[in-house]
Structure formats: structure tokens, C-alpha cells
Image (cartoon, rainbow, N blue to C red):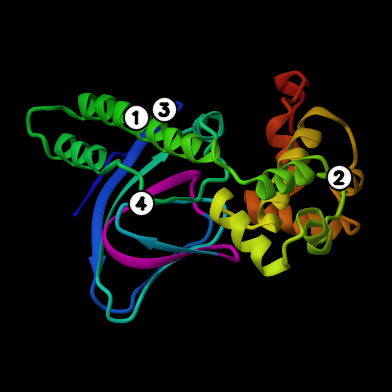
């Protein structure tokens, strides 16, 4: 079952719910996304178990978990053989969606385990199926519900972050201060006195991603800032965020954002020329 809410032509609200649905499987099942429109899908596991794969990261999912599937990175949901599952999803888009997700500290939260948000998904389905509401009123109520979902996900993460272990806190601080450098697992192991396998597992359990994925995301966010606020050449931007090879940096940047560094700069820096001089 699914409901869709297309964006009105000529009107692009900052954030809009564009789809709600539920699905399930009893057999081994794979579903993938790779790129596409700038949307985020918030998927709630109602029952059963499955595995989500986003880039090279793998997340085991069970009832009560939420997985946020990005629009700019490949993702796949895998069934476990013989294990049925059932999930609900809410998909949103908008030119302020990324900023809103970042404001709620959900930028890196692909997986939020055991989150009490089932009632919000039920409400979204009631709104979508209502014969007493027109399309605009449905969208208004769905947008409010979506905001509540973000607030609840952020609150769950905030409560858990308050109990972050000393080892993970030290690793995170170390990585945050070395965005322009290369950091090895040996360094993190020496810093925390943990073996590599254990430190990766611990960091991922508490932060939702591996140390490598966290640092890469931080590097790309810093690169975006440099591209949109400076006239540095792409080669220099790559060097500033710890990439020795400009072409490798460009490939990674495009794979994560859907656009090359030069294209990102053009999109984020307004053209100061008069309208009649553009494109000449």
C-alpha cells in the first residue's frame, strides 16, 4: 500500500512529504536505490529483521528500528533467508530538507535503533487515507507529522549520545580535529588502547557509522564549505581535505553528492553577471 503526494507545478515548498507506504516480504528480497531526486526515505521496521547496506556500511535492522535511506548514495535492503519482515516508510523532499536534517543532528544518523515512532507512522496513514481532507490539508498535517518524526529521532539520539563512551568521545574529537589529514586505524588504536576490530565496532555502535565513514563525511562537508565560500581550485580543495589525488577526490565527491565539485560550486555560488550576459 502506498500514497503519493506530487509537488505542485511551480511550487516547491522547503520540505514536503511526497510518499507514504508499507511493504513486506517473506522471501529473500533485495531493493536498491542509487541516486535519484533529492529525497530521504525514513523507513520503520514494524516486525521481522533485515539488513540495510548504505555504501560500504551494513546495518542489522529489527522491529522498532528506523533506517534513513539517502538519495545521493547507493542503498540496499536485504531480507534474511526465511525471515519475514514488514515495514512502513515516509519519503520527503525539498530544498531545505538537508539543512533541516542537519539542524536536528541527523546528518550521519542512517540508523536509529529502537525508536518509539510507530504512532507517527500510523497517524500518517490515517491522514493519507482520510476522505474528509483535501490534498492541501493532508499535506499540511503530514508535514507536521514529519517534523515530529525528526524531533523524536533527534531526541532518541541525544539521550544516547549523553552516555557516549570515553573511547568513542576521544576518537570523535580526534577525527573532528583532523579533517584536513589522513587518519589511520593504527592512530585510533594507539589513542584508545583498543584493537582495530573492537574500536570500529564500538564507534559504529555509538555513532551509527564507522570511523572511516564519519571522517569521510566530515571531509566532504568541509569541501562543500570551501567550494561555496572560496575561489580555491578543486585541486587545492582536495588537498585541504586530505586527498592527494584531485581525480579521486572528484570521483568520491560526485558519488556522494551527485554532482562534481565544479558543478557544486556553480550551483551554490550565485552568478553575479547581469541576466542578459549569462550563458554568453
**Mark 4 highlights which residue?**
43
Distance of label 3 from label 2 (alpha carbons): 41 Å
Check the image and name the residue furthest to the bottom: 81
Residue at figure coordinates x 33%, y 81% from the top left: 81
Residue 89 magenta-drawn?
A: no
Sooner in the amino-acid sequence: mark 4 or mark 3 = 3
Q: Tell me where residue 200 sits by quadrant.
A: bottom right
Q: Nearer the viewer, residue 150 or 60?
A: 60
- Within-10-Å neighbours for mark 1: few <14, some 14–19, many 20+: some
Q: CA distance from mark 4 to mark 3?
A: 29 Å
Q: Secondary structure at mark 4?
A: strand
Magenta span: helix, strand or loop, mainly? strand
Q: CA distance from mark 1 to mark 2?
A: 36 Å
Q: Nearer the viewer, mark 1 or mark 3?
A: 1
- Per the model, the C-alpha gap separating discs 4 and 1 is 15 Å
- The residue under label 3 is 10
3 vs 2, front mark: 2
Tell me which label, 3 or 2, sits earlier in the chain. 3
* Image: magenta residue range: 36-57
Tell me: 259 left or right of 261: left
The residue pinned by badge 2 equals 180
Mark 4 residue crowding within 10 angstroms, few (<14) / some (14–19) / many (20+): many
Q: Are the residues at dot 4 and dot 3 in contact (C-beta closer than 8 Å)?
A: no
Amino acid at each position: 500500500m502506498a500514497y503519493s503526494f506530487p509537488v505542485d507545478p511551480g511550487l516547491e515548498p522547503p520540505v514536503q512529504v511526497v510518499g507514504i507506504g508499507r511493504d513486506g516480504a517473506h522471501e529473500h528480497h533485495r531493493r536498491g536505490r542509487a541516486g535519484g531526486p533529492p529525497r530521504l526515505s525514513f523507513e520503520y521496521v514494524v516486525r521481522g529483521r533485515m539488513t540495510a547496506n548504505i555504501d560500504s556500511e551494513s546495518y542489522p535492522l529489527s522491529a522498532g528500528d528506523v533506517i534513513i535511506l539517502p538519495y545521493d548514495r547507493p542503498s540496499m535492503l536485504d531480507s534474511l533467508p526465511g525471515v519475514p519482515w514488514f515495514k512502513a516508510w515516509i519519503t520527503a523532499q525539498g530544498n531545505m530538507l538537508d539543512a533541516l536534517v542537519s539542524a536536528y543532528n541527523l546528518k550521519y544518523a542512517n540508523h536509529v535503533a529502537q525508536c518509539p515512532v510507530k504512532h507517527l507512522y500510523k497517524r500518517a496513514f490515517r491522514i493519507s487515507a482520510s476522505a474528509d481532507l483535501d490534498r492541501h490539508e493532508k499535506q499540511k498535517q503530514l508535514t507536521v507529522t514529519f517534523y515530529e518524526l525528526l524531533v523524536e529521532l533527534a531526541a532518541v539520539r541525544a539521550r544516547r549520545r549523553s552516555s557516549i563512551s570515553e573511547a568513542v568521545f576521544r576518537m570523535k574529537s580526534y577525527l573532528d580535529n583532523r579533517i584536513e589529514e589522513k587518519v589511520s586505524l593504527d592512530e585510533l588504536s594507539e589513542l584508545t588502547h583498543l584493537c582495530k576490530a573492537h574500536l570500529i565496532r564500538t564507534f559504529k555502535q555509538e555513532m551509527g557509522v564507522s570511523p572511516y565513514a564519519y571522517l569521510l563525511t566530515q571531509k566532504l562537508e568541509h569541501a562543500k564549505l570551501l567550494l561555496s565560500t572560496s575561489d580555491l581550485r578543486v585541486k587545492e580543495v582536495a588537498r585541504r581535505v586530505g586527498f592527494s589525488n584531485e581525480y579521486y577526490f572528484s570521483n568520491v565527491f560526485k558519488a556522494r553528492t551527485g554532482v562534481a565539485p565544479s558543478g557544486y560550486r556553480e550551483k551554490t555560488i550565485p552568478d553575479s553577471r547581469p541576466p542578459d550576459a549569462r550563458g554568453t
